[in-house]
Image: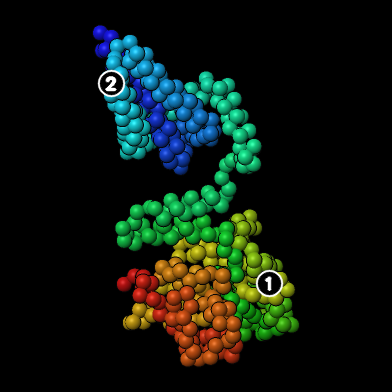
């Protein structure tokens, strides 16, 4: 009878230790994002697990204390039993067997099992250990103070929490871990999620429409000439300048102009351009896309002019440009890739010098450095000169040949990726 009770007690203690050990794994490994999703839907157990996450140090301390108490009772009980009922050899055998049982069934097996059912197990044990944390708070507080004081003696700063940069990197890691297995739709989702995270790091200068590609109109032009320019222009908003192209005095909406023209029965002489224009909105070229997106929403505007530190016009950016940074280039059914880029039969591409590097990286799954906004800017920064037509360079593992040069600007570049960087595109 004594032997039976002893082994029943040992069995229950190991099971309890395994339960506590598995609970530690469940609480620390449960996805916080999924728990928040469940809590938002009214799951009370998820709220308890989230509460344990919010105070993870105390929660882990409580679980470890309980686990150590149970594991402490096993050798105490086995020692008392051995002294009274077993020989020295039998005692050694018993202690060895118990050590194996504790390692396997109180540590390894529970953790392996819980990893397969992390969320269900976390939801089961959450309310239990939520109460345990409250009950044992005085004990854990004292022990945590001892641990913190030890860290202080060792001059290790207890900063606690995670920085926003760590959180962003954690999100990026979670996105990369999302399985896609060659599924284009899943890859597109991953790229969109990563693009959203990049909005706070990319400046407007990287995606703006450069000033050389802007359509601007002088207010001194005859109304007939302005009407002809607007009718052939594919932009919905056009900057107006006075005296010199740098002096932007307003933004003219194409739709507003032709609506006014219709109301005036086509009489161009009745249109006053300066009355139709709205004030220009200037932003610095160092502004981040996330800030600009928020400002677009606040001001209820879709168009802004970009200037450098000297106030010189650099280009423009629209709400659509930022949206395309997230979802990718919005093209019609006849387009297959980034504007200004042509794929060649040998796997290389021919790109205009002003093609954004971010577009190339996203469309072809490349990893060109993005310190410069355009491929022309990147080449000139690396070679430290304005290259001539026909010159070839190998930069970041890519062969780049200058095909066209316009004055001091690179017009066309042939980019040939290395064998492990084959362009990805839709057929």
Task: Find residue 51 and name its label.
Answer: none
- Which residue has dot 2 on it? 89
In this picture, is 115 found above or below 405?
A: above
Q: Residue at x 52, y 34 (%)?
A: 56
**What x and y, as percent, mark residue 71?**
40, 24
Q: Quadrant of residue 298?
A: bottom right
In this picture, is 321 found above or below 399?
A: above
Q: Quadrant of residue 406?
A: bottom right
Q: Residue at x 31, y 72 (%)?
A: 427
Q: Is residue 129 among the parts visible in the rendering?
A: no
- Specify the quadrant that holds the N terminus: top left
In front of the other: 406 or 41: 406
Distance from label 1 to label 2 (Cα)? 85 Å
Please tell me whether mark 1 sits on a helix, a strand or a loop. Answer: loop
Q: Extreme front residue here?
A: 88
In front of the other: 212 or 21: 21
- Which residue has dot 1 on it? 308
**What x and y, as percent, mark residue 389?**
50, 91
Asked if marks 1 and 2 touch (Cβ < 8 Å), the reply is: no
**What x and y, as percent, mark residue 213?**
57, 79
In this picture, is 164 found above or below 82?
A: below
In front of the other: 182 or 253: 182
Q: Is residue 244 among the parts visible in the rendering?
A: yes
Q: Residue at x 67, y 85 (%)?
A: 222
How does the figure colour the protein chain or chains?
Answer: rainbow
In this picture, is 231 found above or below 325?
A: below
Point out the tag, 1 or 2, that comes first from the N-terminus. Answer: 2
**What x and y, as percent, mark residue 31?**
43, 41
- Bin the neighbour count of mark 2 within 10 Å (Cα to Cα): few under 14, some 14-19, many 20 and up: few
């Amino acid at each position: 009878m004594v032997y039976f009770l002893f082994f029943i007690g040992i069995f229950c203690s190991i099971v309890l230790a395994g339960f506590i050990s598995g609970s530690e794994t469940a609480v620390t490994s449960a996805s916080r994002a999924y728990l928040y999703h469940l809590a938002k839907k009214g799951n009370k157990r998820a709220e308890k697990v989230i509460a344990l996450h919010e105070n993870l140090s105390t929660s882990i301390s409580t679980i470890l204390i309980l686990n150590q108490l149970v594991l402490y009772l096993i050798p105490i009980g086995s020692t008392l039993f051995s002294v009274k009922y077993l020989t020295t050899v039998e005692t050694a055998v018993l202690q060895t067997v118990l050590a194996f049982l504790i390692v396997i069934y109180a540590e390894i097996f529970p953790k392996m099992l819980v990893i397969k059912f992390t969320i269900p197990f976390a939801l089961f044990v959450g309310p239990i250990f939520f109460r345990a944390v409250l009950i044992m708070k005085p004990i854990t507080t004292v022990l945590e103070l001892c641990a913190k004081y030890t860290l202080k003696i060792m001059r290790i700063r207890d900063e606690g929490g995670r920085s926003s940069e760590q959180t962003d990197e954690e999100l990026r890691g979670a996105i990369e871990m999302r399985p896609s297995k060659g599924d284009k739709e899943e890859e597109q989702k991953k790229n969109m999620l990563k693009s959203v995270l990049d909005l706070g790091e990319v400046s407007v200068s990287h995606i703006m429409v450069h000033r050389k590609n802007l359509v601007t109109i002088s207010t001194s032009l005859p109304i007939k000439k302005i009407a002809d320019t607007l009718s052939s222009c594919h932009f919905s908003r056009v900057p107006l300048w006075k005296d010199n192209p740098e002096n932007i005095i307003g933004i003219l909406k194409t739709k507003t102009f032709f609506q006014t023209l219709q109301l005036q029965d086509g009489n161009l002489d009745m249109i006053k351009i300066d009355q139709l224009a709205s004030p220009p909105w200037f932003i610095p070229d160092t502004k981040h896309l996330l800030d600009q997106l928020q400002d677009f929403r606040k001001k209820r505007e879709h168009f802004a002019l970009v200037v450098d530190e000297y106030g010189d016009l650099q280009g423009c950016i629209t709400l659509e440009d930022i949206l395309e940074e997230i979802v990718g280039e919005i093209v019609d059914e006849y387009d297959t890739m980034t504007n200004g880029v042509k794929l060649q039969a040998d796997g290389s591409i021919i790109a205009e010098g002003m093609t954004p590097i971010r577009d190339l990286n996203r469309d072809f799954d490349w990893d060109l450095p993005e310190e410069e906004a355009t491929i022309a800017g990147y080449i000139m920064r690396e070679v430290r000169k304005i290259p001539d037509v026909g010159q070839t360079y190998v930069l970041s593992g890519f062969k780049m040949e200058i095909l066209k040069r316009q004055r001091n600007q690179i017009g066309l570049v042939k980019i040939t990726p290395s064998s492990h960087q084959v362009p990805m595109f839709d057929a």
